[in-house]
Image: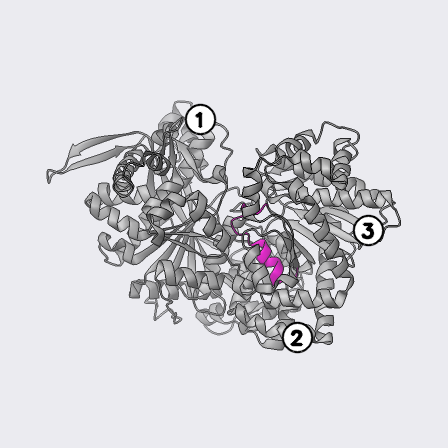
Amino acid sequence: MSSNLIPLKPSGTLEDNRLALDKEAIKNAFLDALFYMQGKFPALATNNDYYMALAYAVRDRMLQRWISTAAAYTKQGSRTVAYLSAEFLMGPHLGNNLINLGIVDTVKECMTEMGLNFEQLLGREQEPGLGNGGLGRLAACFIDSLATLEVPAIGYGIRYEYGIFFQEIVDGWQIEKTDKWLRFGNPWELVRPEWAVDVKFGGTTEQYIDEHNRLRVRWVPHKIVNGVPYDTLILGYRTNTANTLRLWRSEAPESFDFAIFNSGDYYGAVNQKITSENISKVLYPNDQELRGKELRLEQQYFFVSCSLQDMFRILKRQNLPVENFYEKFAVQLNDTHPAIAIAELMRLLVDEYVLSWGDAWAVTCKTFAYTNHTLLPEALERWSLAVFGKVLPRHLQIIFEINAHFLEEVRIRFMGDDARISRMSIIDETGERYVRMAHLACIGSHAINGVAELHSELLKQDVLKDFYELWPQKFSNKTNGVTPRRWMVLCNPKLSDLISEHIGSDWIKDLSQLKRLEPLAEDAEFRQRWRDIKQHNKRIFAALALKRTGVVADPDSIFDVLVKRIHEYKRQHLKVLHIVYLYHAIKSNPSLEVQPRTFIFGGKAAPGYHLAKLMIKLITAVGEVVNRDPDVRDRLKVVFLPNFNVTNGQMVYPAADLSEQISTAGKEASGTGNMKFSMNGALTIGTLDGANIEIREEVGAENFFLFGLSAQEVYAIKAGGYRPQDFYAGNQSLRDVIDLIRSGFFSRGDSELFRPLIDGLMYQDPYLLFADFQSYVDCQNKVDRVYRDYELWTRMSILNTARSGKFSSDRTIREYCKDIWHVESVPISLLTHAEAGIA
């Protein structure tokens, strides 16, 4: 990178230099930040210094919008969405902010003229891995859409010092490394220590009579930690709105004890600091051990308590009574992680603000809404009473009281139905007693939603059936969506430019306008340009794959992609069975005509999930054999891209030809990767699961490769006594595949390595791989035939993009605003220093 930067003299006023979006102003701001923020000049500056300088220059241009937004919300007392989520998987900020400001080309020209490589600067940003997968990425898309739609909103979460682990693949096994995303600094956040709050843990409770002769409860905690807010600006696309993502960091009230230090106990002097900071140290600490369980519960309560106390601070600042809390804030619980907020709001209202129980409960129920994200029973959080009572003794009392009132309502409504009462109780009494957090969320919320039409129906029919029968009016569906700003404009600029060239750029804020592309599917010249862009994207990904894995991927092959969290229900191992099927067919007949394919995998397994790690090992082991076998002659290649995250996703989705969405029907709540693929012109092969159903409805059954059992058929086959051995015995191809893996062929002769996976399939197969195997193989054969007709494939690709408008997170957020939150947009006018009252 050149250090021959063009010297520039500042021009105009300070305010002009920090607000203007022209090239000269941006260059000035960049050099100013390099000098005054980084303390460097070009001869000494590193790539990271240049990135930080550019980030600060861009952030300056966002701050006016942020302050103007905050001023408008304060002045108008706007009803505000508070989005509580344990995860916010934001992805890199710089590129997204440049798009939303509308200055990508301007900044790129600036950097080029100054002798710097713009793409390298973008690549310097450390991705904040503050989420595990779809849940956190959905939260990020939602707050992008809230700002774009000019809806007053605050995202609340945890500022994890170490995010989701960095994944390396060593000898085919996943190795977890610490994600040190903060090691070079984070220019996008602003710390607000003046708004820090105290959070209590443990201890005991005691009753007392206050000065007004009221019986009250005092919580005497074992420890107190400080929650310090760090604010990140969330800019809307081409709007003046900049909302806030407020993430909490835990700190000790006193980080150093002089008395203990002077006594010679040097470690003890900082012990409180260490234990306090542990709460926000790591995303999802391993909870196999008791201390891990306690720490997870502490994390959830910590960010919820901080956030609710912050809302009360805002309420006070705007001179609003606490009884109006629900009128000011619509609080959305993103899954069960923040469900303790219901008990915490009750504690604050009853213990701190002295509302009666009835009044406090009315406020609470009108405040919260709950989004359920899973159909897997093991994913519905619950806490043993021993752990819960130790960490949150006051909240356990509150939950018992909430439960008592609730069960009385159930008894009256369903008289004599003791089994229903047992099923619906917040406290699971069937063995060791547990607090069921999903039940607490349902009871304390005025609205409950699933995230795809099938998911919402299955919640009503199965997982939350009892609650639906009690309160059908609470339930609705809000199919997920993703933001087209990141997942089309940023990650696929050539395709976005082609679309804008033909239908204008308004589609970026109104994705339904993509429908106007449909007639162009019949335009031969447009199809050729569409194919050229796909090939360009595939070449970029092939270069990345070669650099990261050493595998040569042919851009002319089908890029067949399965990237998502590694889990048995997502069935990455079904994809592997298909690869082995093709490999066995080629070995049996080396002259077999097979459309060349590159199978691309990516995803992380939970550190304690051995079978998922073994699935990764199987993928890489099969790839190791297939990739070097001369009989295959490059017809099949297997790539496992390590450390799949938002940054890598931005390379993968535009390059994909085929999107693998092959979960067992009835197991995936929605999925959002399926939407990102479809928007970028990939065709889907999938089951009738999650949002796949709606994607198929939108793009047309003829443009979707469907296979496998439906959710109803899955239930029926299991109810009838599913025997995977029968499918094995009755299908020669399946036997060949399983026997080849079991023999040790892909494990260097070790027939024991994959035994846990193979035995699990042979004798349990809970996710019905064997039942869906032949349907999947037949459907993949159809994919092979269709791809050979490149004009037909391109038409189908164009129509997938053209008909993906429903899956914008803007549409989802509009539905939440109308049906659940009842909030209105608030257009923002930009303020100058003087108008903000700080001149």
- Which amino acid lies under the numbered mark 1 shown in the image of this protein? Tyr
Mark linked to residue 635: 3
Secondary structure beneath disc 3? loop
Observer able to see residue 290: yes
Return the disc, 2 or 3, that comes first in the chain's sequence.
2
Percent across and percent down for residue 239 are 46, 69
Pointer 2 and pointer 3: residues touching (CB < 8 Å)? no
Q: Closest to the observer: 430 or 825? A: 430
Quarter location, residue 771: top right
Return the disc, 2 or 1, that comes first in the chain's sequence.
1
Q: Closest to the observer: 139 or 807? A: 807
Q: Residue at coordinates 78% horizontally, 40% vertically from top-left? A: 624
Q: Closest to the observer: 114 or 438? A: 438
Give the answer, above or below, for where 83 lies relative to 381. Answer: below
Pointer 3 and pointer 1: residues touching (CB < 8 Å)? no
Q: Which residues are magenta?
A: 664-682
Please say whether residue 671 is one of the residues in the magenta stretch.
yes
- Which amino acid lies under the numbered mark 3 shown in the image of this protein? Arg
On the rendered structure, is 167 left or right of 397?
A: right
Mark linked to residue 266: 1
Return the disc, 3 or 1, that comes first in the chain's sequence.
1
Q: Where is mark 2, residue-wise?
A: 520
Secondary structure beneath disc 1? loop
Quarter location, residue 539: bottom right
Give the answer, above or below, for where 478 lies relative to 603. Answer: below
On the rendered structure, is 114 left or right of 157?
A: right
Observer able to see residue 44: no
Percent across and percent down for residue 596 are 80, 54
Secondary structure beneath disc 2? helix
Name the front one of labels 3 and 1: 3
Mark linked to residue 74: none
